[in-house]
Image (spheres, rainbow, N blue to C red):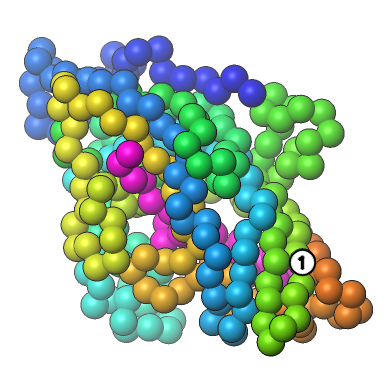
Amino acid sequence: MQPRLLAGAVPSCLLIPLLAACGLDSQQAPQVQLSVVVDGSGMGAFDNDLGYHIEITTMRVAFDNVEFTTGGEMHASLLHRVGGALQELVIPTAYAHPGHYAGGEIAGEMDGRFVVDWLADGTEVGTATMLATRYNGANFVFTRATANDVPAGDPLLGHTMQLAGTATRDGATWSFHGFIDEEEGKRVIGLPIGDDLEAGAETPHFDVDGDTDVALGLQMLMVDPFEPDTAFDKLDFAELDGDGDGDVELVVGEAANNLILRQLQVHDQYAVSIR
């Protein structure tokens, strides 16, 4: 797959408003090209809320148009503790944590279509063009892999995610596998960005100037760094194994698949690290 990357600069029709939003002089604002790589550190083994020890052996995801943002609104954690239907009416769960900015101005971009193997730590994804400013968040867009993205016969073709792994509890182990089909064009907004993403960091950020020379790491997180939630909470693999053969297929459209789909479409499960 050959990703479609920016040709060295933000298009002129976007540059002036982006610079103005960042408070920068359009005649002097530097910009840099930064490598974007896979950060697989969030794919380690974990325990879900039902006591299953889960190891991911396959996690491939198709997405496009990664944006890096400055400013925006940082939502207070107080609203997240309201809970229930009221919380969802007031503020979506995806925007409820400290350090998660939504609605910021786009000041950097990695344009194109990408298929990422999140177990291939350090693999280059593409190149981002970044204006010099302070970055507070990032966004990306889910897609479904096409024949232009993967070879003929690739199992990810037509899907957003391909996943597999094992789940162990009380000495018994189940293998699981399946595909996730996110809505085409579904945006994930407000990924935290920075080298201070440890749990409890109130305002993670990343400062770029004309001399910045680092790589940005795209993270997929199986465990929410702000709360003890996991992407596989509420999945009871023994119950899902109806025929008792130790193999669980996560079928598109069924309840277990829908549960993972919902949990993997919020920015709690993603971040951008500095490497």
Residue position for label 1: 175
Q: Position of residue 271 (x, y in %)?
A: 38, 51
Q: In this view, does 242 lie to the left or right of 168?
A: right
Residue 117, compared with residue 30, is above or below; it is: below
Q: Where is residue 199 in the image (x, y as percent from the top left)?
A: 29, 66
Residue 248 occupies quadrant:
bottom right
Residue 181 seen from this side:
no
Q: Quadrant of the N terminus?
A: top right
Where disc 1 sits, the SS reads strand
Q: Where is residue 221 in the image (x, y as percent from the top left)?
A: 47, 58
**Would residue 103 be counted in the magenta stretch?**
no
**What residue is shown at x 83% (from left), y 69% (from top)?**
247
Amino acid type, label 1 = Ser
The part of the chain drawn in magenta is 254-275
Q: Position of residue 163 (x, y in %)?
A: 68, 54
**Would residue 261 be counted in the magenta stretch?**
yes
Q: In this view, does 237 lie to the left or right of 107?
A: right
Q: In this view, does 254 lie to the left or right of 13?
A: right
**What residue is shown at x 88% (from left), y 80% (from top)?**
244
Residue 236, compared with residue 270, is above or below; it is: below
Front residue (pair 157, 274): 274
Q: In which quarter of the image is the C terminus?
A: top left
**What residue is shown at x 75% (from left), y 65% (from top)?**
176
**What residue is shown at x 22% (from left), y 20% (from top)?**
31
Residue 71 seen from this side:
yes
Residue at the far bottom in the pictured view: 170
